[in-house]
Image (cartoon, helix red, strand yellow):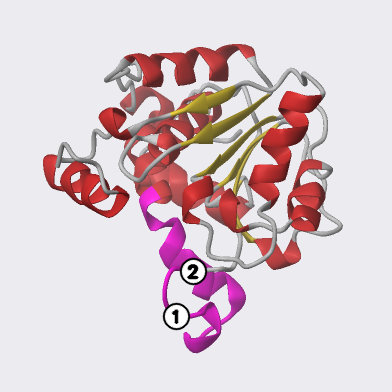
Amino acid sequence: MEFKGTKFQHDRNPPPIKALNPTQAEYLAALRHSQQIVVLGPAGAGKTFIAATYAADLFRQGRIQKIILTRPNVPCGRSLGFFPGTMQEKFAPWAVPIAEAIKERIGEGAFDIAVKRGDIEMVPFEVMRGRTWKNAFVLLDEAQNTSVMEIKTFLTRIGEDCISVVNGDVGQSDIRETSGLRRMIELIRDHDLPVPVIEFGLDDIVRSGLCAMWVRAFEGDARV
């Protein structure tokens, strides 16, 4: 990694990631000890932010060579097909919050270099087939919107020395068929697979009081 030992590394010494509640602490512990983690729960609980931040720290320390970010092409609202540009350009807006979290940890200059070199990739799910990753941190976001075959494709792309995080909220699937995330959880539990499943609840929402209020309202929680 070119910027290991250069000003990029010396100028960035961010504090350790701090858990804001017991479930986040459980999540961080799973990241330290497991190669693959499933993380479930509502918006605003830190599912994606913690994964991106942890991946950035591993990358900054030279413990992984690549960060791979992906999500299925089932957006909430208009399809990506309505937006101009290449698939990569269409995909980029959904990766902005993740990219910003990584930039905070490694610096914008290091981030830009890593993207240009392909060390940080934002990969549309459509091009997943045929890819294999090694020595990487791989984040699949919004996994509730994968089909069973799509989640199988993703899980069988993971190579050696990888950490993979599968994020989602099974109650918020935008597809009509069986959710691949739901099937993955069933297989983990049916076969006692060594993949931790971290579950955030409404009380774990940390984004803001307004976020928590609206999630509770849409979930019909009496404590709104």
Q: Can I make out residue 161 in this image?
A: no
Q: Is 91 within the magenta? A: yes
Percent position of residue 39, x then y: 52, 33
Residue bearing mark 2: 75
- Helix, strand or loop status at disc 2: loop
Closer to the camera in the image, 110 or 222: 222
Marks 1 and 2, how far apart at CA? 7 Å
The residue type indicated by label 1 comes to Arg
Closer to the camera in the image, 92 or 47: 47
Residue bearing mark 1: 78
Closer to the camera in the image, 169 or 2: 169
Q: Residues within 10 Å of mark 2 (few under 14, many from 20)?
A: some
- Helix, strand or loop status at disc 1: loop
Q: Can I make out residue 32 in this image?
A: yes
Q: Is residue 119 left or right of residue 160?
A: left
> Looking at the figure, which quarter contains the N terminus?
top right
Q: Are marks 1 and 2 in contact (CB under 8 Å)?
A: yes
Task: Identify the residue at horizontal 81%, vertical 45% (top origin).
Answer: 157
Q: Is 97 situated above or below 159?
A: below
Closer to the camera in the image, 110 or 162: 162
Task: Identify the residue at horizontal 24%, vertical 42% (top origin).
Answer: 221
Q: Quadrant of residue 30?
A: top right
Percent position of residue 188, x then y: 74, 28
Magenta span: chief secondary structure: helix
Percent position of residue 134, x then y: 78, 35
Q: Residues within 10 Å of mark 1 (few under 14, many from 20)?
A: few
> Looking at the figure, which quarter contains the C terminus?
top left
Which residues fall within the magenta stretch? 75-97
The residue type indicated by label 2 comes to Pro
Q: Is 148 situated above or below 190?
A: below
Q: Is 156 situated above or below 80?
A: above
Task: Identify the residue at horizontal 60%, vertical 66% (top origin).
Answer: 175
